[in-house]
Image (cartoon, grey):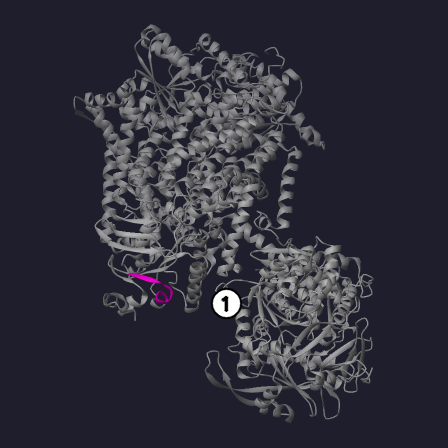
Amino acid sequence: MDLLFKIFVEPFALMVSAPDLLAQTLWEGLVGGVLYALIALGFVLIFKASGVFNFAQGIMVVFAALTLVGLHEKGVPAVLALLLTIAVMFVLAVAVERVVLKPLVNQPDIILFMATFGLTYFLVGLGELIFGGEPKVMITRELFLPQGATDLQLFGGVVRIQHIDVAAAVVASLMIAALAVFFSKTRIGRALRAVADSHKAALSVGISLDQIWIIVWFTAGIVALVTGIMWGARSDVSFALQIIALKALPVLILGGFTSIPGAIVGGLIIGVGEKIGEFYWGPLIGGGIETWLAYVIALLFLLYRPQGLFGEKIIERI
Amino acid sequence: MRAPDTPILAKGDVLLAVENVSLSFGGVKALTDVSFDIRKGEIRAIIGPNGAGKTSMLNCINGFYHPTEGRITFKGATRRRMRPYEAARGGIARTFQNVALFKGMTTLDNIMAGRSLKMRRGFFWQALRQGPALQEEVEHRRVVEDIIDFLEIQAIRKVPVGKLPYGLQKRVELGRALAMEPELLLLDEPMAGMNLEEKEDMSRFILDVNQQFGTTIALIEHDMGVVMDLSDRVVVLEYGRKIADGKPEEIKRDQRVIDAYLGVAH
Amino acid sequence: MAFRKLCLGALTAALAGAASLPLPAIAQETIYVPLFTYRTGPFAGSGIPVANGKHDYLMMLNERDGGIGGVKLVIEECETGYDTKKGVECYEAVKSKGPVMINPWSTGITLQLIPKAGVDKIPILSMAYGLSAAADGNVFPWVFYPPATYWDGASVFLKHVAATEGGFDKLKGKTIGLIHLDAPYGKEPIPFLETQAKEHGFNLKLYPVAAQDMQNQSSIWLNIRRDRPDWLYIQGWGAMNPTAVKEAARTGFPMDRLVGVWFAGGEDDARAGGAGAKGYKSLNWHAVGADFPALQDIIKHVVDKGKSQTPKDKVGENYYNRGVYNAMLIAEGIRNAQKITGKKVVNGEDVRRGLESLNIDEARLKELGLAGFAAPVKVTCSDHSGHHAIYIQQWDGTKWVRASDWIEPMRDKVRPMLEAAAKDYAEKNTGWPKRTEPCDKSS
Amino acid sequence: MLSSADPRGEHTFPQLIARNARVRPARTAFRHKDLGIWQSWTWAEVHDAVRAYAVGLHALGLRRGGKVAIVGYNRPRLYWTMAAAQWLGAVPVPVYADSVAEEMAYVLAHAEVTHAVAQDQEQVDKLLSVSERVPTLKHILYDEPRGLRDYDHSRLHPIDEVIDEGRKRLADGPEAADLLARELEATQPADLAIILYTSGTTGRPKGVMLTYENVLRAAEIGCAFDKLNESDEIIAYLPIAWVGDHIFSYAQAIVAGLCVNCPESPDTVVEDRREIGTTYAFAPPRVFENMLTLTMVRMEDAGALKRRMFKFFIDHANKVGEKILNRERGVSLWDRLLWRLGDLLVYGPLKNRFGLTRIKVGYTAGEAIGPEIFKFYRSIGVNLKQLYGQTEASVYVTMQPDGEIRADTVGRPAPQVEIRIDENGEVLYRSPGVFLGYYKDPEKTAETKTPDGFVRSGDAGFFDQTGHLRIIDRAKDVGRLRDGSLFPPKYVENKLKFYPNIKEAVAFGDGREYVACFINIDLVAVGNWAERHGVTYGSYQELAGHPLVYDMIEKHVDEVNRSLASEPRMGGAQIKRFLILHKELDADDGELTRTQKVRRGFIAERYAPLIKALYDGSTEADISTEVTFEDGRKGVIAARVKIRDMKTYPVEAPALEMAA
Amino acid sequence: MFYREAGQYKTSYAADMAVFPLREDRIGLAVIILAAYALAFTRNDFLLQAVMIPFLIFSLAAIGLNLLTGYAGLLSLGTGGFMGVGAYACYKLMTAFPEVNVLVWILLSGFFSAAVGVLFGLPSLRIKGFYLAVATLAAQFFLQWAFNRIPWLYNYNLSGAIEAPLRTLFGVPIIGPTATAEVRYLVVLTLVIGLTWVASNLVHGRIGREWMAIRDMDIAAELMGIKLFQTKLLAFAVSSYYCGVAGAMLVFLWYGGAEYTVFDINQSFFILFMVIIGGLGSLIGSFFGAALIFIMPIGLGIALPALLGPFGINVGAEVIEQLRFMIVGALIIFFLIVEPHGLARLWQIAKQKLRVWPFPY
């Protein structure tokens, strides 16, 4: 009875009694969700265009951020370092296309999946070799990112909004909008969408598959860089960050592997869901349930809709 | 292994009755009010233009789809929402329009897999693969070898089916279905994509199966020559409706069939 | 001092002369000291300075003194990546080379090695980490846990809180939070804090941080905001610490009420919080900074000669000095063993005895060029930790400054709990050997 | 070793089967790859089955002297049919399985068979289709029931049913057993055991009648010669109507008690032989030739290292392998060790691939085998031998004893065989295996058999200095040059064809000044050679006319000339001129028979301008020929063909008189 | 090269269906097993303790995952969790009933992970492919959390870890600090051989065929009367059983004690690497994969300094480690490109080459 009370009454009572906390929780959830969505976006881009489940997206985030900070540490001005990092991500995209994707074209999904594991290992080693393993502080100020926080007086309490989080949300929105334009308005973008359906269709648009892959991986690299900057600004830049990338997996399940809106909505749902869950129900079983709550949410959701939020309904044919 | 309560049917009795079956996906009607029957020991052809609902009909019969309306009675028993494996257990086997073999396995293993239903040894013996389990494997291997011999595919016994040419794959698939010792064998375009010689072979096998084992066969086929030669009775579907049903000679003369289908083919 | 140096120099010269003789047997007289380090992986941030400190101090001994007691040290790092699997691999790799002791630098690896130590006759020096119960030398003769245990740390934290609040009686009704890595290491202080909470009537709140969410702590800090604890104690490691400090700064938690255990006291940990981190406190038992003769020697003999991976300005940072401290314990353990046994080349069993009768007093620290660097350390046969004094340091925005005197842990509270835990361990591990190793008199 | 003088007096095959069932009941007698595994029968089971079968056949009306046709591939039950028929004193008449209905009708009618045993539906269909023309035929039995279910079974019986019927009768009472005992005793050694029809190159097949004594004595000679015993394995894949199969897979198997293995189908012989690992094998030269060619072609695709290793060891084997096999002295320890190593790395695996790992002795006969090929197998440790035999002799005429094995002779007269060579060079022989006569053809019998019991072989040959017989050609084909020296065209052609680069050769010379020759290159072999030597070519014609190819072929011809010069009486047949044909000789153009034999006359006519040029001294000649393409279209190809002159060698060997 | 197939004919189906129908293979296997046992007497602790014992245990776990992923086609990322269930179950059992021999508990502990595996396998009826893989991640993270958070599982040990108390077999210590590496190696080897034999039996029989059938074409399999759900769950159960036993062995026969972090997501990936690099759907491939993924880095760690040393490049342990990472990553990609079907396929090809030796095909 007491347990039922704690599960079904107390958390809601808390929500009502402390609306500022609820608002703060929702905000934190949304911000976390945006960052999850960004990582998921990287996955989706690549999955959509090349059918590769890119496990290396997490390390790409770290690698991009590390390159940026590392270059800056070596004395390169911030803006130049940013441009150089973008160039590095391009080189990475080309290298991945040449060395990994091309030789493995038409292999089963799981093989490509596995290859991105190899890529992860390689990038971990390379990144540490070049930049060392110690955590680095994100060059927030140098990149003209806002710092500090604003306290909003709301619901008789305080909701603290970090400027960097707002910036993250804005940048993420811009990013998504840019991608949307890119996909719907440009020739390359349309080709990318076509390639998701069939490789031949893309060829008819006049863009080779190689180019498309490079573009997609490069785009994912940019997304990774943005994610890295934002997340790095929240904590710091270290290899531990790649583990967070796993959080994108439940987001993907929820949103579907091929849907960009799915990645965003899924990210927000997971972000908010796990924060609310952890905050209001977590203490019941000792807290720390965040690690698996997202997966369980995704799993339960899958049982209801096996194709994800925005995936198409599958009719089995024989 | 016949369950004691199922009636033993004589040749010519109704083995399977399809009554007023309709099937729809969302708003799309795949089958509308289709009724026909299949009698024990006959070769029953289902023909019709592309998209007429032939494969959907087979899917309903073996429980892969569940009819939205109507009922299907097999060996006198009507099962609502029958699962595919229940159909298989009941004695319905089938082959597929696009070969649906187990690509990673050899011909032998594919056909052995068709014996799964008949194998009884549980996990324990399987884990030991000695005594009864091995004995059982050998017994079933013997049956499978007869099928291999029957279909003349000895040479490819241990070849992974993925490496076989299409015609042989179809033959292996037939073998796999035969391994189930079905009472009703559903063949979905068994000769699609075959050359003349392969078609002749396949026709011979189908007839042999029908005569030698007394297996009732329902087949979908586009090659009218084959259909008319092989089948005892033909049912014609168009846009999910039955438009004709009868002996091949009758069908050939049926004006609606000629309009809908045969006119184009001939 | 000068005389000593002279003697050492003469000895070294003599040895060098001896070594130059075509006598391979003498040339091979070395002491093998493997160092388990992690310069890679998610915990590399903390691992690198520690590894550098350990390595550089021992290297300095080799360069300056020609080793210990005239015997060169063979220093070999083995990269564990903070991964237990690789730790076991490292252990097996070094075992055959006759190591005199093992410094696992990971609680996980330590736990694996504890049972092996007695069997393989290789002592384990787990300096202020590992299995708390191992501080009981009667049960764990092969494991050493100086200078203090996590429970000592937590008790010092409480003493500090009580002192700030105005006495233990003021703790009643207060809320004290523990934000910890959700792993055995992070959970170590919980039983002690729980008993204390009962005793003093404060409210203990736990905030576990999962390893994969080390850099994603926002919900934890939401909880903290809700519970409004008066004090927060951080038992974290690696990337968890800077994130926690940062989050504390972001959410406006009063930084002078945020205290980290000694493994949450790196410069990088505090630096991440930027200006907002000013006022953050952490425990420590050794000094920060390079203003010690020994550290200057390191710069002179090792860093300047390019034999270290440390940039000069990082010498003297907290974790670097912790490595130095650790290396000092290693060296002193070996030296003591040489003294007790009279052998120059000592083995694991000798060093165990050396560690067990370790007594580094002020004078000795001075000799070492580490006067004021740390409190004296003494280990006895029954007490393998010593429960030595700890001080509080505070971040001034750019560096650590000392913020308290030496605070003695609550030895009377900690010791019985430790002994009970050791007993429990021995009971649960049936067949745990009774101590048979004789006890040397403390030197 | 058993001989016909065995006191127990087993002088028929049924008696020997009974003996085997007694002496070695549990040893495997027959195996048949069927339904995926080797189904096996022990001698006891075979004995039992044959007894029952005999009773069953008796019940179907088979009586002493009756003839039983046996049609099909090698199957245990077909061999048992022979034994069961012989048990009753009836005569089995095996028929070639691939013979068309027409031939079958003739043989069946000629032999007046009353019963026919077929392997499967195909043969049954054939039999049924000719049954009207064979009025004596009463019953047809079959082995494999597949597809025969709906046939009219009034005169059609599955063998198993017949055997079961026999079993039932044997179980029912002693009458059947008495009958068996009676019939077994009644058969005499001199009785007719079997009629084997030979497909003569001309005219109707002739039925060679062999008695029990013929066959048994021949089998015993063979068994004794190669020390065959019950542990040996043989694979039965040659037509059961051929005397070789009858002796090897039936007679010798029963005499020695060895095991006969029937392959799953004609297509799987190679795999099946490999599985069984026969110890005693027979194959015509082309089988060995194919295996070698395949080996060489495949090795071309191997990696460089492997190829070099292969070449090194094969070269080594060429040097010492035969000596080691012959247990000759004078091979150094190092060479022996190296050969052992080669055996591990190359020869052993090769033999394994060929299924010859366990081979005790292998025979090749029927045609001349290339010395290179022959030497290759011997050098890697396969005890390959040649023999010369004929149906009329129950196979054995000459054999090669161990240690005296050479590629160019067919060996010494087999035990108990006498040989003489008549003035025309034709070989005549007399032996215990010599046949009774041609069935219902005393004329032909008289033509072939001399009054003193010698049989005309129809082959020309001579004994060389070592006392080995050499067969040079069919007696009627051997011609003479204008100067009277001997010209055996096939002998010359074969020598040329032993080179892998030469696919066909047509030699001319009968009644002319000298020998000249057309040569057809082997596209695969020469193509490979060209690739390795950087010779580019666009077509067969271009390749054939390439000067480097000519040079290469010239070397081969030169070698042939040298070897001819060193042989007695052959020196005159050295090739003076040759040309390489611009197109492949093709059966579609009528230049070859369907069995790939050269039609000399037709070619001479078709390529008359070239022949003219060969003999008028011109250095090249134009030719245009009509050809049939693969799709059936016809066309004309024209070419200018070069002619090369060859050097001839002085004849070394004294011209021996042909009469030995 | 070593094959002499001539003369190896099968006269019965039992012989024809044997797992090793060729004599040379049987001899080779016997030689390998004997050599493996002989290894125990080298008394080389590094080889046994740091290489062979973990290699064998990981091989067993890889076999477990391979049964699920390679044979039944169900991708799982929860291996670490299932291994953990085995380890913790074994710990609870052996401390609760110390009188029963520990080997019994090791073998029984697998049943607990089997049960948990079945539980988390339930969604496999509805979801497939990567979706299912992510669902198994839920198992991984939940279980990991549970191992840490439920003190009952580790008997309320203050260290939060589970430790191997002394246990003996016929008076010889096999678990605990005094158990020598040789003894533990022999125990591990025997268990692994036995369980591999059972796995081989399963995959070569009806159950294995049913798994492969649903892997290759689940619809066709169902229409042939194979119950998808039961078959998939059985795959989950058997797979988890193997993983569980491997987990118990990992802790008690190798580490001697463990924290929950041993069974983290990296462990799952680690095993998955082995399975894929080794070859999906191949038992021997599991061993190859374990060798490559586990032993190769160790070898590199030894070989790299030796290789770089002569060139005067003296690098620290961490550079070696970083190079190790890079090389392992590159090799994974390299092997996938060379042979996407894993080392097992390379092995098959090599074997085939040996069979047709000296021919290239």
Q: Badge 1, how many Cα within 10 Å: few under 14, some, many 20+?
A: few
Viewed as shown, does residue C384 lie left or right of A150? Answer: right
Of residues E119 and A251, the one nearer the viewer is: E119
Task: Give coordinates of residue E13: x percent, y percent.
Answer: 58, 50
Q: Quadrant of residue D9?
A: bottom right
As drawn, C30 above or below C381:
below
Viewed as shown, does residue D329 lie left or right of C159? Answer: right
User: Image quadrant for the N terminus of chain C?
Assistant: top right
Q: Quadrant of residue D213?
A: bottom right
Task: Give coordinates of residue B182: x percent, y percent.
Answer: 42, 52
Is residue B234 highlighted in magenta?
A: yes
Viewed as shown, does residue A317 lie left or right of D317? Answer: left
Task: Give coordinates of residue E311: x percent, y percent.
Answer: 57, 44
Of residues C412 and D519, the one nearer the viewer is: D519
Q: How many marks?
A: 1
- Residue at the location (45% across, 53% down)? B176
Determine if residue C381 is in view.
yes
Determine if residue C146 is in view.
no
Chain under callout 1: D
As drawn, D197 above or below D479:
above
Of residues B160 and B180, the one nearer the viewer is: B180
Per the image, the residue denoted by label 1 is D152
Is residue E210 highlighted in magenta?
A: no
Viewed as shown, does residue C163 lie left or right of D653? Answer: left
As drawn, E16 above or below A171:
below
User: Image quadrant for the C terminus of chain C?
Assistant: top right
Task: Give coordinates of residue C144: x percent, y percent.
Answer: 54, 18
* Residue segment shown in magenta: B226-235
Of residues C295 and A30, the one nearer the viewer is: A30
What secondary structure is found at the residue carrying circle 1?
Answer: loop
Q: Quadrant of residue E268?
A: top left
> What amino acid does circle 1 point to?
Asp
